[in-house]
Image: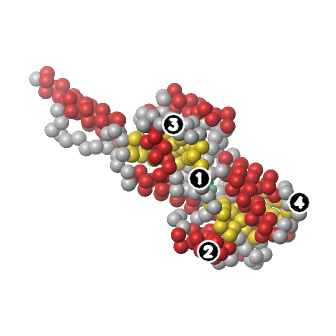
Amino acid sequence: MVQRKRVMGALVTATVFMSLVAGCGAKTTETTSATTAPQATKAAEAAKAGDGKVVVGFSQIGAESGWRGAETQSIQDTAKADPTIDLKFSDAQQKQENQIKAIRSFIAQKVDVIAMAPVVETGWEAVLKEAKDAKIPVILVDRGIDKKNEDLYTSFIGSDFIVEGQNAAKAMAEHLGDKGNIVELEGTVGASAATDRKKGFDDEIKKHPNIKIVKSQSGDFNRATGKQVMEAILKSPEGKDIQGVYAHNDDMALGAIQAIEEAGKKPGSDVKIVSIDGIKEAFEAVKAGKLNTVVECNPLLGPQLFQAAKDLKAGKQLPKWIKSNEDVFTGQKAIDALPNRKY
Ligand code: GZL
């Protein structure tokens, strides 16, 4: 009788554990009702260990741009295609507090690796210290955090935003014939991608004294917001004499293009446009003569992320920065590349 009770007790424990793990959206193995006590415990243990899989908790910012959607797709598709990966994915809807909650949940689930795209650079110290205390390595994806917290993450997989900004400035100077007034549409305030794209562009454009940034404002990496900001600028005194727009991402550039057209001007000719990301729609806008240069920023980071997670689980060292290779596309080069663009 006691033996039966013990078996039942173990089965209940395993079932409860499995439903908890399943509730977190994890891929779990099915346990059969015929499982006896020792096997039930083994099944529960295996589920906790992710069946020898590499269990990665990823905190995604949200879905603010075409680029972000492409990154999410890459990460989810790569995990789906790889049976050795168990991905726990969380969408923070642009809120840092949701990212912090997700990271705490990953710590509680004892994942092997925590990955995150930090919406802004600051405010991560406490939660990343908790991850460090729990001996769970952290990989930053596509955005960075405060340099003073470099010891709180293992590796950053992403672009050199300063170089992207410099390349955008060089292209803008070329398109403007080295003179003119420009508007800068900045990304999310406090995001490393915005801070560094601004620094790279503004420092480079200083080498062209006849080019003036007459207005610089955040459009939050979002198309609708980018359009609204551009509409307001075009109605302002500074907006009366604009020859160029530099947008920190394609979505804001595409919003600005709409605003410029609605104001009766020709984007791509009256107003030169340079943006960063390289989503397909931006290449199509170049082909339509409405956008002049696209600086590529690679969002297809899924393969690199999961290779890095596997390497960490295998005890390998990672470089502090796994840098993306990127290109700059102007005019015919963009048109020729369009058919092969993957995002
Ligand atoms: C860049 C990434 C930026 C993209 C935007 O790595 O963080 O965030 O440029 C996205 O499109 O919103």
- Contact flag, marks 4 and 3 (Cβ < 8 Å): no
CA–CA distance in space, label 3 to label 1: 18 Å
Residue 19 vs 172, above or below: the answer is: above
User: Residue 133, can we see it?
Assistant: yes
Task: Give SS at disc 4.
Answer: loop
The residue under the point 67% across, 52% down is 161
Task: Using the rendered view, name the quadrant where residue 229 is placed.
Answer: bottom right
- Amino acid type shown at disc 3: Gln
CA–CA distance in space, label 4 to label 2: 31 Å
Q: Which mark is residue 324?
A: 1
Task: Using the rendered view, name the quadrant where residue 112 is placed.
Answer: top left
- Contact flag, marks 4 and 2 (Cβ < 8 Å): no
Residue 113 screen position, x and y as percent: 47, 38
Q: Is residue 196 left or right of residue 240?
A: left
- Amino acid type shown at disc 1: Ser
Disc nearer the start of the sequence (3/2): 3
CA–CA distance in space, label 1 to label 2: 22 Å
Residue position for label 3:
317
Query: Which of the two residues, 237 or 291, is positioned nearer the viewer here?
Result: 291
CA–CA distance in space, label 4 to label 1: 31 Å
- Contact flag, marks 3 and 2 (Cβ < 8 Å): no
Disc nearer the start of the sequence (1/2): 1
The residue under the point 55% across, 37% down is 154
